[in-house]
Amino acid sequence: MATEGERRRGGLANNTPTATTSAAATTGTTSSSATNPTRQQPRQPQAPQPQQRGGSVEAATRRVAAGGPGRGGPAATQQQQQHAAASSPMQGGGGTGGSVPALTEGQRQEIKEAFELFDTDGSGTIDAKELKVAMRALGFEPKKDEVKRILLEIDKDHTGVVDYQSFLDVMTVKMSEKDMREEVIKAFKLFDEEDKGRITFENLQRVARELGEQDMTDEALHEMIDVADRDGDGEVTLDDFLRIMKKANMF
């Protein structure tokens, strides 16, 4: 039989909360808290950054050529893009097989007649030395260095002759350049409304306004002129304009 002291100690032990019970209670509280975690706030979508508008003479010219509001500009944007992608010996590119605007039937006939004028024996080839003269017959005045570049491209085997297809490829690019030059001159005249032969700050202001370029600052317009203006008089001549457009591969 248990003594009186042992019974008392047993009773105290039964009435005292055990560490296991306390831990279980604590674990229960923690588990309940884990099943209801604090919900994370959803991420706020970032506002799209405004796109910068084109701030260059060539960018403005493309929009003018495409025909801005209230303007009857020539719709030449697609042709300009095709020509910019073209690769030709005249532009220092990889060949004459690039994508260039197609010739009209009349243009093809002119090229054929010019070639046949020098293909006197009907062999389908002309002497490489006659390339420059044949190009002049079509209204072009190629420089000596340009003719050399063309011949290096189309007569890689140094045969000394040029076949019709090579001549056609060369003249297709040249005529495309001529057409685009004319379109660029038309665009210049749309800027130069007073026909002074120069584009002024006021001209750019007017065109920017007509094209809806409300965020184009005066400072940005002055910078556009400074880029093109070689003599520093604050105005852009036709030669300045053509130089910038050629640099931008618009012709």
Image: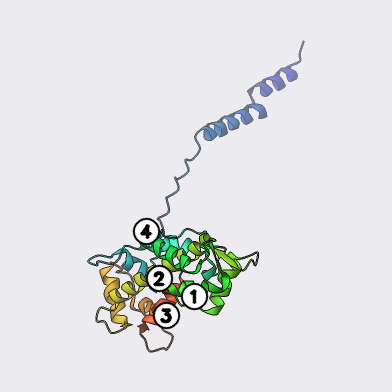
The earlier-in-sequence mark between 3 and 4 is 4
Relative placement, left or right, of 142 versus 194 is right
Q: According to the image, label 2 marks what residue?
A: 178
Q: CA distance from mark 2 to mark 4?
A: 16 Å
The answer to whether residue 160 is seen in the rendering is: yes
Q: Are marks 4 and 1 in contact (CB under 8 Å)?
A: no
Q: Position of residue 220 (x, y in %)?
A: 38, 76
- The residue that appears at 31% across and 62% down in the rendered structure is 75
Closer to the camera, 168 or 39? 168
Q: Amino acid at mark 3?
A: Ala
Q: Position of residue 76 (x, y in %)?
A: 35, 63
- Whole-number angstrom distance, CA of label 3 to CA of label 4: 37 Å
Q: What residue is pinned by disc 4?
A: 105
Q: Which mark is residue 133?
A: 1
First along the sequence among labels 4 and 1: 4
Report the residue marked by disc 3.
228
Label 2 with label 3: CB-CB less than 8 Å: no
Indicate the position of residue 2 as horizontal and vertical percent values.
76, 13
Q: Amino acid at mark 1?
A: Val
- Distance from label 4 to label 1 (Cα)? 22 Å
The amino acid type, in three-letter code, at marker 2 is Lys
Give the Cα separation between the discs numbered 2 and 1. Answer: 18 Å
Nearer the N terminus, badge 1 or badge 3?
Answer: 1
Image location of residue 110, percent across then percent down: 40, 65
- Could you say whether the residue bearing mark 3 is in a helix, strand or loop? helix
Question: Which coloring applies here?
Answer: rainbow
Residue at 40% across, 56% down? 48
**In the picture, which quadrant includes the C terminus?**
bottom left
Say whether disc 2 or disc 1 marks the residue closer to the N-terminus: 1
Q: Which mark is residue 187?
A: none
Residue 50 visible in rendering: no
